[in-house]
Image (cartoon, rainbow, N blue to C red):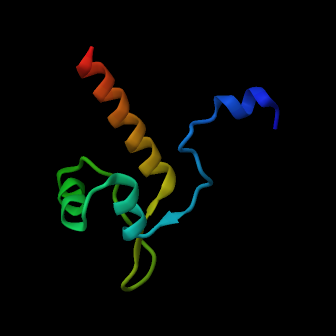
Protein backbone atom coordinates (compact mmCIF):
# COMPACT_ATOMS: atom_id res chain seq x y z
CA UNK A 1 0.00 0.00 0.00
CA UNK A 2 1.21 3.49 -0.73
CA UNK A 3 1.15 6.20 1.85
CA UNK A 4 -1.58 8.04 -0.13
CA UNK A 5 -3.82 4.99 0.09
CA UNK A 6 -3.16 4.65 3.80
CA UNK A 7 -4.10 8.25 4.54
CA UNK A 8 -7.29 7.98 2.47
CA UNK A 9 -8.67 5.15 4.62
CA UNK A 10 -11.07 5.90 7.42
CA UNK A 11 -9.76 5.72 10.97
CA UNK A 12 -12.55 3.23 11.74
CA UNK A 13 -11.99 1.01 8.68
CA UNK A 14 -11.41 -2.64 9.39
CA UNK A 15 -11.57 -5.86 7.38
CA UNK A 16 -15.05 -7.12 6.53
CA UNK A 17 -16.28 -9.62 9.10
CA UNK A 18 -19.31 -10.69 11.06
CA UNK A 19 -19.92 -8.74 14.25
CA UNK A 20 -21.80 -10.35 17.10
CA UNK A 21 -24.14 -8.35 19.34
CA UNK A 22 -21.59 -7.44 22.04
CA UNK A 23 -19.29 -6.01 19.36
CA UNK A 24 -22.14 -4.03 17.78
CA UNK A 25 -23.11 -2.71 21.22
CA UNK A 26 -19.52 -1.61 21.81
CA UNK A 27 -19.20 0.09 18.42
CA UNK A 28 -22.52 1.93 18.60
CA UNK A 29 -22.91 2.54 22.32
CA UNK A 30 -26.44 1.12 22.08
CA UNK A 31 -27.90 -1.77 24.03
CA UNK A 32 -29.64 -4.80 22.53
CA UNK A 33 -33.20 -3.50 22.81
CA UNK A 34 -32.37 -0.19 21.15
CA UNK A 35 -30.50 -1.91 18.30
CA UNK A 36 -33.48 -4.18 17.63
CA UNK A 37 -35.92 -1.24 17.84
CA UNK A 38 -33.83 0.66 15.28
CA UNK A 39 -33.74 -2.43 13.03
CA UNK A 40 -37.53 -2.75 13.28
CA UNK A 41 -37.89 0.91 12.30
CA UNK A 42 -35.54 0.41 9.35
CA UNK A 43 -32.96 2.78 10.83
CA UNK A 44 -30.19 0.25 11.46
CA UNK A 45 -28.58 -2.49 9.36
CA UNK A 46 -30.37 -5.82 9.53
CA UNK A 47 -28.69 -8.78 11.13
CA UNK A 48 -27.64 -11.83 9.12
CA UNK A 49 -28.75 -15.25 10.29
CA UNK A 50 -25.68 -17.46 10.78
CA UNK A 51 -27.42 -20.51 12.17
CA UNK A 52 -30.44 -21.66 14.13
CA UNK A 53 -29.66 -19.45 17.11
CA UNK A 54 -26.93 -17.13 15.88
CA UNK A 55 -27.09 -13.77 14.17
CA UNK A 56 -24.42 -11.23 13.31
CA UNK A 57 -24.04 -7.94 11.48
CA UNK A 58 -21.91 -7.15 8.46
CA UNK A 59 -19.05 -4.95 9.65
CA UNK A 60 -19.18 -2.86 6.47
CA UNK A 61 -22.90 -2.18 6.93
CA UNK A 62 -22.24 -1.01 10.50
CA UNK A 63 -19.33 1.15 9.37
CA UNK A 64 -21.48 2.72 6.62
CA UNK A 65 -24.27 3.36 9.13
CA UNK A 66 -21.75 5.13 11.42
CA UNK A 67 -20.47 7.27 8.54
CA UNK A 68 -24.03 8.27 7.63
CA UNK A 69 -24.72 9.31 11.23
CA UNK A 70 -21.59 11.50 11.19
CA UNK A 71 -22.58 13.13 7.88
CA UNK A 72 -26.12 13.78 9.15
CA UNK A 73 -24.74 15.18 12.39
CA UNK A 74 -22.41 17.55 10.52
CA UNK A 75 -25.21 18.72 8.20
CA UNK A 76 -27.61 19.52 11.05
CA UNK A 77 -24.96 21.39 13.03
CA UNK A 78 -24.13 23.70 10.08
Q: Quadrant of the N terminus?
A: top right
Q: Quadrant of residue 48?
A: bottom left
**Is residue 31 found left or right of 13 in the rendered image?**
left
| Residue 19 in the image, given as x and y percentages of width and height | 47, 65
- Which residue is drawn at the image coordinates 62% and 54% (left, top)? 15
**Residue 55, quarter of picture:** bottom left
Quadrant of the image occupied by residue 11: top right
Q: Which residue lies furthest to the top in this view?
A: 78
Q: Nearer the viewer, residue 30 or 43?
A: 30
Q: Is residue 31 left or right of residue 67?
A: left
Quick check: 23 above or below 78?
below
Residue 67 in percent (x, y) is at: 42, 36
Across and down, in percent, residue 45 comes to: 35, 53
Between 55 and 71, the one lying in front of the other is: 71
Vertical order, 58 against 32 (above or below): above
Residue drawn 63% across and 35% down?
9
Residue located at (42% from left, 65% from top): 23
Q: Horizontally, is 12 left or right of 70 in the view?
A: right
Residue 56, placed above or below residue 67:
below
Q: Which residue lies furthest to the right in this view?
A: 2
Percent x, y for residue 78?
Answer: 27, 13
- Furthest-bottom residue in this view: 52
Q: Which residue is drawn at 37% across and 69% down?
A: 21
Q: Does residue 78 lie above or below 12 as drawn?
A: above
Give the number of callouts: 0
Q: Is residue 14 left or right of residue 50?
A: right
Amino acid sequence: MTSNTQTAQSAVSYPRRFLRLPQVEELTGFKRSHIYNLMKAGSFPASVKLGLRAVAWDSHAIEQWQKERLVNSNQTSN
